[in-house]
Image: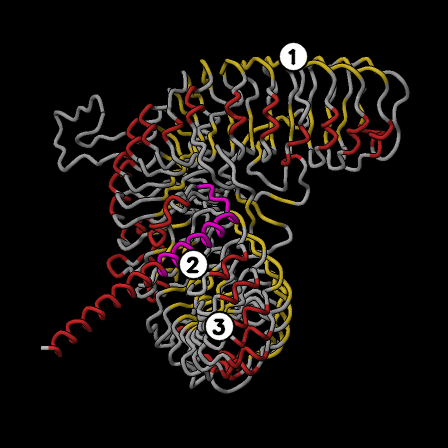
């Protein structure tokens, strides 16, 4: 009995103990969770969350820390992962990160604006396995203290601004499996010590441009290496044969370097599947290299371009006959023919762009029975052999014959190759029309034939190509009306086909192309109205109908273009008021309605244009193959309403569009003053308000407009990043705008070379010129003629060292012409005619013959 009582007593004590233990553990964990929440809130202080993605990171929500955006915890509620990717975060990593001692992953990739340096406190995160800071603005030297992170498996600092050499201490991270340091500004040599990383599977140092020296033979000790990518650097010497002997190496990309050759031996035992040797400085016989490649029994993808002096004549049959080879890239050589007889193997991709083919051989259709993708751009071809499409035997899915000398017609046999998905015949001299029977190409997704001499009407069966996403027929001589939709359910008002013997169904029209994203019919002779059925193509991102002979109104159905980026209907004969709701589009980049006959008030929906934060893409002259982003901004990047009959007050809504780069309202009936808020447009490069009825003075704070001050940045293309980044760049001069330059009307095909212009001419502006004009040191063209400006010509204008044209004529300026203007180095056109000037004419430099008084 006593023993039972003692046992019961012990059980109670044990229960109390475990209850107290659980309570203490709960308090300890709660305290730990609260402490780590405080650390995360401190970490957040270093971040500017422009999109509001971290709103749940707040002191009132500490209990739910493990459910915060991007946070993962283990079973003890310790933070083990911070994954904040593609959120457009700005800022830096604060030292408090080192207090998260259980952290296994820190991933801040694709934010584009995170910057600064990695704090040394990160080494306190001794369990860290993944560090991914790629696609940001981090800079400086890659810190040597990263070598203390013994458990680090994945290190990606791709696409940042790291410079100097890679420190050998990185090899202390013995667990490393992935090192991606590509697209930085790294220099120096590859450390020999990296050969100690026996677990390393992928090493990418591509696109640094400045790394040099020979490859360390120690890399041959990285027995786990699967991928080695060294493209676009300055590595020299011979490629060690040790690399070809690595047991599991699949990808070796060493293009665009200065390697002089490959050490002999080792090819036959190679496991390499993908080999890229393009554009090196091989000074050894290419025959020996070709013979070695033929021994690589696992090779599937080979790029051997950029040797125009060494690879010429006939493509070696031995290359084309490699049984395992699936993709062969021989671009930028001097090959001119294809061997007549060889075994074709499994070759599905053949790229022979930038060679010297004058014609395709008669047996071309033989190898096109297996080739799916054929790239023949930039050769010397003069015609398209009809037989290459091969009817039922044709395996072609994509063909590119752009930028040749094609001067015949497009063969009718094109439509017999039913597997075709992409056709590019652009920039040639093709004659005639599009083949009849285009409706047969039901798999077609892209058709580009811009810049040819094609004529006739648009093919009526376009609606049958339901998979089409890109159609570019621009810069031809097509004529007739745009497509109408005659299919059941369309809005066609009347279609009478009675008293005939017709059979079959009516082909659907343009409205049936629900996957269409890009439609460019610009620079043709198309007439008639824009069909309302076009509004059913709700996925469209680019619509360019400019430089045609279209009339009528903009269809209200175009409100359905919710994905629209660029709308260009300029240089037509469109009329009426513009009632399209531009606010219905999510990410509008450019709106071009210029040189039409639109009338009425400025489009009311300009005020509805999204003010979502995004970026402008520009290229840096100091970084090859790269870009940088300007600070976050709002609104569209180009507005062109020139040469219409719009009327009303100056639209101050544009002051909120801080992304705006081009503003052209010239030749309308716009009244009022130029508001001071125009100085908010820090990205503006072109402003043309000429030939309106503007009054008042120029704003004082023009020197805030940074776009007129930059002299070392060129705009690469209109582009943007949204919440899920989508780069959109345009070639072929899709974006164009008209200006009056030195008295002549010209069209600028794109924003290039930092072209900058201010044109306030032919208005009723008055007062003295603001002194802040002298701060716009990147301004190239300034025209304020035919106004009522008065006072003296500011001496400070002479500080505009890149100014090429200055027109101050037809105003009320008085006093003398500043002598300093004679020494403006780029000034080639200068007019001060019809003013009240007096005194001597400045002399010096080229002003002597260019001045107009």
Dot 3: element: strand
How far apart are the two marked residues, 1 and 2, measured between alpha carbons? 57 Å
Name the residue: 62% across, 74% down: 236
Structural crowding at the residue carrying mark 1, measured as other residues with C-alpha within 10 Å and reported as few (<14), some (14–19) or many (≥20): many
User: Can residue 87 be seen here?
Assistant: yes
Percent across and percent down for residue 767 are 72, 14
Q: Is residue 283 above or below residue 85?
A: below
Q: Mark 3 — residue?
A: 228
Structural crowding at the residue carrying mark 2, measured as other residues with C-alpha within 10 Å and reported as few (<14), some (14–19) or many (≥20): some
Location of residue 817 (image quadrant): top right
Going from N to C along the chain, the mark reached first, 3 or 2, is 3
Going from N to C along the chain, the mark reached first, 1 or 2, is 2
Name the residue: 42% across, 56% down: 36
Percent across and percent down for residue 267 are 46, 83
Is 641 or 533 nearer to us in this picture? 641
Q: Quadrant of the C terminus?
A: top right
Q: Is residue 825 above or below residue 305?
A: above
Q: Mark 2 — residue?
A: 375
Residue most toward the front?
2
Which residues are the magenta region? Answer: 28-51
Indicate left or right for 179 with 782 as reference.
left
Q: What label sits on residue 764 in the rendered view? A: 1
Q: Quadrant of the N terminus?
A: bottom left
Dot 2: element: strand
């Amino acid at each position: 009995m006593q023993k039972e009582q003692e046992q019961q007593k012990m059980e109670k004590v044990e229960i109390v103990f475990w209850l107290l233990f659980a309570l203490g553990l709960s308090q300890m964990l709660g305290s730990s969770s609260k402490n780590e929440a405080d650390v995360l809130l401190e970490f957040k202080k270093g971040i500017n969350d422009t999109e509001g993605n971290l709103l749940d990171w707040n002191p009132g929500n500490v209990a739910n820390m493990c459910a915060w955006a991007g946070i993962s915890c283990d079973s003890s509620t310790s933070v083990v992962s911070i994954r904040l990717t593609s959120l457009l975060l700005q800022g830096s990593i604060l030292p408090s990160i080192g207090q998260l001692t259980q952290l296994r992953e820190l991933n801040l990739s694709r934010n584009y604006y995170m910057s600064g340096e990695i704090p040394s406190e990160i080494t306190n995160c001794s369990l860290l396995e993944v560090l991914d800071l790629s696609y940001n603005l981090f800079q400086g030297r890659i810190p040597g203290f990263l070598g203390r992170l013994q458990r680090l498996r994945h290190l990606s600092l791709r696409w940042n601004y790291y410079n100097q050499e890679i420190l050998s201490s990185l090899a202390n991270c013995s667990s490393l499996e992935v090192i991606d340091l590509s697209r930085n500004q790294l220099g120096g040599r590859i450390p020999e010590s990296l050969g100690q990383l026996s677990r390393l599977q992928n090493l990418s140092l591509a696109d640094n441009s400045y790394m040099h020296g020979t490859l360390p033979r120690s890399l041959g000790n990285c027995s786990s290496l699967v991928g080695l990518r060294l493209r676009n650097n300055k590595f020299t010497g011979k490629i060690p044969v040790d690399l070809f002997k690595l047991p599991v190496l699949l990808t070796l990309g060493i293009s665009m370097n200065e390697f002089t050759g490959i050490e002999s031996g080792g090819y036959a035992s190679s496991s390499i599947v993908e080999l890229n040797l393009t554009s090196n400085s091989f000074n050894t016989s290419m025959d020996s290299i070709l013979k070695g490649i033929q021994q690589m029994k696992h090779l599937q993808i080979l790029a051997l371009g950029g040797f125009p002096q060494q690879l010429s004549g006939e493509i070696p049959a031995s290359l084309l006959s490699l049984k395992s080879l699936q993709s062969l890239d021989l671009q930028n050589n001097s090959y001119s023919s294809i061997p007549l007889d060889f075994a074709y193997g499994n070759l599905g991709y053949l790229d022979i762009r930038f060679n010297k083919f004058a014609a395709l051989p008669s047996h071309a259709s033989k190898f096109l029975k297996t080739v799916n993708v054929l790239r023949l751009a930039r050769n010397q071809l003069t015609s398209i052999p009809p037989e290459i499409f091969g009817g039922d035997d044709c395996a072609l899915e994509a063909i590119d014959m752009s930028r040749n000398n094609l001067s015949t017609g497009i063969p009718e046999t094109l439509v017999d190759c039913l597997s075709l998905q992409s056709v590019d015949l652009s920039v040639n001299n093709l004659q005639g029309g599009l083949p009849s029977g285009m409706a047969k190409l039901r798999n077609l997704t892209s058709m580009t034939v811009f810049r040819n001499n094609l004529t006739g009407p648009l093919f009526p069966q376009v609606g049958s190509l339901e998979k089409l996403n890109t159609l570019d027929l621009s810069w031809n001589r097509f004529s007739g009306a745009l497509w109408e939709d005659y299919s059941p359910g369309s809005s066609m008002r009347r279609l009478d086909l009675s008293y005939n013997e017709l059979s079959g169904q009516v082909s659907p029209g343009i409205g049936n192309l629900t996957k269409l994203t890009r439609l460019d019919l610009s620079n043709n002779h198309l007439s008639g109205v824009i069909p309302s059925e076009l509004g059913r193509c709700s996925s469209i991102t680019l619509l360019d109908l400019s430089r045609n002979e279209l009339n009528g109104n903009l269809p209200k159905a175009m409100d359905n273009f919710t994905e629209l980026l660029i709308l260009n209907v300029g240089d037509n004969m469109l009329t009426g008021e513009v009632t399209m709701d531009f606010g219905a589009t999510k990410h509008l980049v450019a709106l071009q309605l210029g040189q039409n006959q639109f009338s009425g008030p400025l489009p009311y929906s300009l005020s509805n244009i999204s003010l979502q934060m995004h970026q402008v893409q520009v290229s840096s002259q100091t970084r090859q193959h790269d870009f940088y982003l300007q600070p976050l901004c709002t609104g569209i990047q180009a507005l062109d309403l020139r040469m219409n009959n719009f009327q009303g007050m100056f639209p101050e809504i544009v002051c909120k569009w801080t992304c705006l780069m081009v503003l052209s309202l010239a030749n309308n009936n716009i009244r009022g003053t130029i508001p001071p808020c125009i100085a908010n447009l820090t990205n503006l490069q072109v402003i043309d308000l000429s030939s309106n009825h503007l009054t008042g003075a120029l704003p004082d704070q023009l020197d805030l407009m940074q776009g007129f001050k930059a002299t070392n940045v060129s705009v690469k293309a209109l582009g943007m990043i949204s919440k899920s980044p989508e780069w959109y760049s345009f070639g072929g001069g899709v974006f164009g705008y008209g200006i009056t330059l030195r008295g002549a009307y010209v069209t600028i095909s794109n924003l290039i070379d930092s072209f900058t212009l201010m044109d306030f001419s032919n208005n009723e502006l008055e007062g003295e010129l603001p002194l802040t004009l002298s701060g716009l040191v990147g301004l190239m063209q300034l025209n304020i003629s035919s106004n009522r400006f008065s006072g003296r010509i500011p001496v400070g204008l002479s500080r505009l060292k890149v100014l090429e044209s200055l027109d101050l004529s037809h105003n009320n300026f008085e006093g003398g012409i500043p002598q300093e203007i004679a020494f403006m180095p780029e000034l080639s056109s200068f007019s001060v005619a019809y003013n009240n000037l007096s005194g001597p004419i400045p002399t010096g430099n080229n002003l002597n013959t260019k001045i107009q008084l």
